[in-house]
Amino acid sequence: MVRKKVEFSQYKQLRRAYSFDEVAIVPGDITVNPDQANIDLTIEDYTFSLPIIASAMDAVTDVNFAVLLSKMGGLAVLHLEGVQTRYENPGEVLARIAQAPQSEVTGLMQQIYAEPIKEKLIGERIQEIKRQGGTCAVSVTPANTKRFAPLSAEAGADILFVQSTVTTARHVSKSYRGLIFSELRQMVPLPVVVGNCVSYSACLEIMRTGVSAVLIGVGPGAACTTREVLGVGVPQVTATIDCAAARDQYYKETGQYVPVITDGGFRKGGDVCKALAAGADAVMLGSIFAQAKEAPGLGYHWGMAHPHPALPRGTRIKVGTTGTLEQILFGPTSVTDGSQNIVGAIRTAMGVCGVTTIRDMHQAEMVIAPAITTEGKSWQKAQSSS
């Protein structure tokens, strides 16, 4: 008896996606002096000398940190729905979070973040940053954007970030009329940065609403547990490549260049360089900056979704305090793991790739690479763990 072969169509096909550890940048055919590299980031009328943004997390950005990073050439984003706008003395609250036992910290944060947001503190924090000469960027969630965006503009904020775990241009809601980014652009006279997304189609649709920049990344952050809790996300190299393709398509359509900012998952300078080579115009750093002496988290870091009252998607991690913000950005450094002098790493990588602008860095060749520990680095790993 001859069995008939049964034909069937594949139900779902998976493609390979890549994280920072799985790729490497190929050196260029020429090299240039690192000090010739132009690493500016432009968001509409604002130009920053560093393509580096501090994340809108309570353990990373407060008023003082925002002013300090701004004066160094970067940009820090103040979380308008965090402890800075819920408490008159946020430093005391941050200390309680840092000192709490690990078994109790999630419950404590749920309690702390249940305190109502005080609208007067929104204006006060923004004005404190502006009075000290800093560029003021603020972050809100989509649910509170219509309420807080006008208050932020009136207080003098420079750039508005609208962030959630996953953001799309088309959101289905029971409310009569949800947040529409094209209308938001008309509502407030500020550049609007939107995130987060990880796909070509979502990124392109968001750009077509007229936003100023897009944040890329779902689930890769050191303090984020979205991949574990929800199972959603795309490794950052692949997400960046896909969204950079959307940016280039939008530029072809309109002649308008909308920066993409890779947000989350960075541990060292090499990761930042790989993100730029993958197509990012800038990066947003959280845990790296949480290690700065000036960071308000006191050596700890946690995600924005950690204090959710019903479904926390984060954890408090101990990152320690490794150096000043200046050391982390510019050195000098005595550590060899790439966690400091991030700007020096960017410039040096651009130099060995033979490029002088970040947009040229997008053209650098990348290859799929084995994990670094398989290439003669096992001794380093063994010694670092001993």
Image (cartoon, helix red, strand yellow):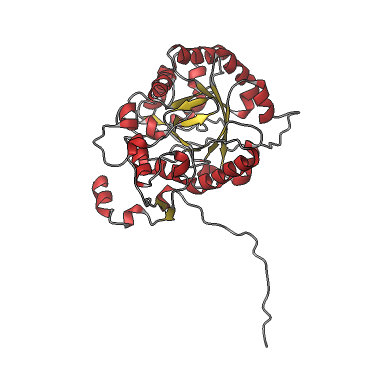
Quarter holding the N terminus is bottom right
The residue shown at (42%, 45%) is 274
Q: Nearer the viewer, residue 32 or 95?
A: 32
* Residue at the image position 44 percent from the left and 44 percent from the top: 361
Q: Quadrant of residue 270?
A: top left
Instruction: Measuring from the top left, give residue 92's x and y in whole percent.
Output: 41, 17
Q: Considering only vertical position in the picture, is 93 above or below 354?
A: above
- Say whether residue 175 is left or right of residue 378: right
**Where on the picture, by quarter, is residue 75?**
top left
Residue closer to the observer: 302 or 203 = 203
Residue drawn at (48%, 36%) of the image: 314
Left or right of residue 188: residue 279: left
**Residue 121, x across and y down, in percent:** 52, 13
Q: Is residue 230 above or below residue 102?
A: below
Asked if 201 appears above or below 188 in the picture, the reply is: below
Q: Position of residue 158 (x, y in %)?
A: 53, 20
Residue extending farthest bottom: 1
Residue 115 picture location, percent across and down: 54, 19
- Please indicate whether residue 358 sits to the left or right of residue 172 in the image: left
Which is nearer the eye, 277 or 163? 277
